[in-house]
Image (cartoon, helix red, strand yellow):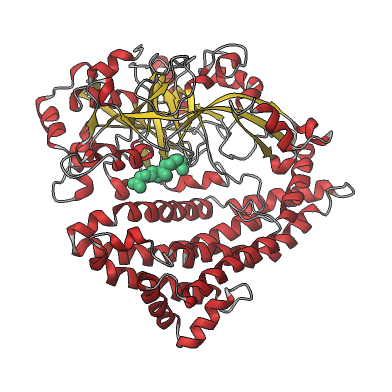
Amino acid sequence: MIKRSILAVLCTLALLPAAADEGMWLPSLIAPRIKDMRAKGFRLTAEDIYSVNRASMKDAVVLFGGGCTGELVSAEGLLLTNHHCGYGAIQRHSGIGHDYLTDGFWARSREEELPNEGLWVRFLVRMDDVTERLSAGETAQEIIAEATDGGRYKAAVERMYYGNQSFLFVYEQYDDVRLVAAPPSSIGNFGSDTDNWIWPRHTGDFSVFRIYADRDNRPAKYSPDNVPYRPKRYFPVSTKGVREGDFTMIYGFPGNTQQFVTADAVNYVQNISDPAKIDIRTKRLAIIKAAQQSDPALRIHYAAQHAGVANAWKKWQGEVLGLSRRGTADKKRDYERRFTEWAAGTQYQDVTAELREEHLRIIPVYFAREILNETLRALPIPYSARALEHPLFERCIPTEQALFRMMFAEYERHIGSSEYAVGEFRRGVERYGSAEAYADRIFELARTDAVNEEIKTLVDGIADNEAALRKELGTAALRNLNSARLDELYARYLRGLREFDRKRAFFPDANLTLRVAYGTVAGYEYADGEYHKPQTTLAGILAKDNPEVYDYNVPQRLRDICAAGDYGRWGVEIDGRKTVPVCFLATNHTTGGNSGSPIINGRGEIIGINFDRTWRSTMSDLEFDPAICRNISVDIRYVLFIIDKVGGAGYLIDEMDLR
Ligand code: ARG
Ligand code: GLU
């Protein structure tokens, strides 16, 4: 009886949302977090995570191709990342008779590993706080020039906390990165856009590469003489699996968050920017989808564009839902009110009012820029010769023209009467009578007469408009609602926050620099009375299987394996049934760029590869809400199972250090 109630208490505790798993910490400053990490199950030290004196986990993590993360898993330079991160490379090697995107790719020997021009990975050599050097008068250029060591390294000075602190990052870049393996898209992109940002998830979102180096293990351009890179450190692979409540850590390169923005900025995102962009993309997707459904060749032709447009489109919808349901703007408004009360009589007393005033000033400017990017700048004005020579171009004309009409009409509707509109666009609409008529004219020229004066004037007009908007905002750093003045005000506001909110553990916004996030494996309450478990299995893949639906057409090989129960050493018992785990949820704070990041257990072994977040939890770019914010990883056991049983590439597993 007593035993059972203790168990019940423990179970309830395990189901509670883990407190305060918010944070993307700078690895060199992780020491103060270690106590909390250890309490959650971490068994290693700060030096194991980041060290300049000896090999540490940071030496096993790379920035992969400028937008994703990858990790080393063997002494011979074997690297894991997501399928959607390797997609471009896989696609470029695909053709008739060797369609690796559809069928998968498994190099049977080192000789079969495929080089990829332009694909690079970067290791972080070290990071240093250079705030004082900068305030002593050194310039970022000088600091960078010194750090590159005559061209051996890449270096960058990155501003944190709106410039209150700055760090030098020194990287070593390897340029010979070869494709080793990829599952068929029906595994690597299973569920595709339908399941994207959604839980329960069953995507085997992984691909395998290998880094090559010269004979001295140094970076080198591709050469057949290059040899597999010998990393300072690589991750052992855990085959023990994960359970709800287990410690998890993510090491990777998150791209962009805006944690510190005020309620006005949240309102802008939630009520102005996201809804307008969602609406434009809904129309854009409808046009693309109609073409795809009318013609199987066009389905493939527009697949990449559809996936790209749909990804942010769906993310923004989840973000709006998350922000509105969780009341982020109200919470922030309240926080700012308390801050302002506290700030009376200090140097911070006016800062929230000034922030508000500047937000109101720049919202129309920034909005004009965003809509320009979503509409006119998203169109090929003019088409490239390559696009025009494409054998399918003729068949695309009605679709392309419809896209021009729709985008011109949307730009006109949102920005046409704003003082920040492209002048030449307004003149064109007047000359031809409507946005649609003007679109028809420009479309005709864009595909037939690239050097025409009218095309050139519009293209120049768009460029001039952009430059004017940038000038108005006073800054080129425009990934988020921002201006030079806002940057200054936020820097001051953050200095105030540190005095006001002394209990808060501050971490800088993501900016594609290396970060550590940690938390636990955890489900969440999806809706009233509806708990989402943190783990999916092969059973869910079979339940979704439908040969009629492209996104859910399970490859026959996988069906056969399941029918025969042929799971090999990867089968585990879950709820009394033999199966293979596929994906799992955890409370790690992640964002775009964390794709491909290793998810690591308390002993520093890889347990999965991060690839997504649940829909509403994408609000965590503005506010991390521990009750709902979850990242999605593919279980490393599913990766191994697919490599072994579908790829027949057990020799890759032999290279790894399985625990
Ligand atoms: N949502 C994930 C990430 O932003 C995966 C995107 C790729 N998958 C897809 N179905 N489009 O960016
Ligand atoms: N799929 C995203 C990426 O490509 C990660 C998902 C997220 O935004 O958390 O980085």
Residue 189 vs residue 539: left or right? Answer: right
Q: Can residue 249 be seen at all in this image of the molecule? A: no
Residue 156: image location, x then y, percent: 64, 35
Residue 596 vs residue 579: left or right? Answer: right
Q: Split into 4 quadrants, where in the image is the N terminus?
A: top left
Q: Residue furthest right?
A: 345
Q: Can residue 371 be seen at all in this image of the molecule? A: yes
Place residue 56 in its image quadrant.
top right
**Residue 358 against residue 86 in the figure, above or below:** below
Residue 564: image location, x then y, percent: 9, 25
Say which residue appears at 36% left-offset and 37% top-offset.
Answer: 86
Residue 182: image location, x then y, percent: 28, 32
Of residue 478 and residue 276, the one placed in the foreground of this image is 478
Of residue 321 and residue 124, the one placed in the foreground of this image is 124
Ligand 1 image-quadrant field: top left
Say which residue appears at 37% left-offset and 17% top-offset.
Answer: 237
Residue 5: image location, x then y, percent: 42, 21
Place residue 562 in its image quadrant.
top left
Say which residue appears at 16% left-offset and 32% top-offset.
Answer: 558
Residue 568 vs residue 205: left or right? Answer: left
How many marks the image carries: the answer is 0
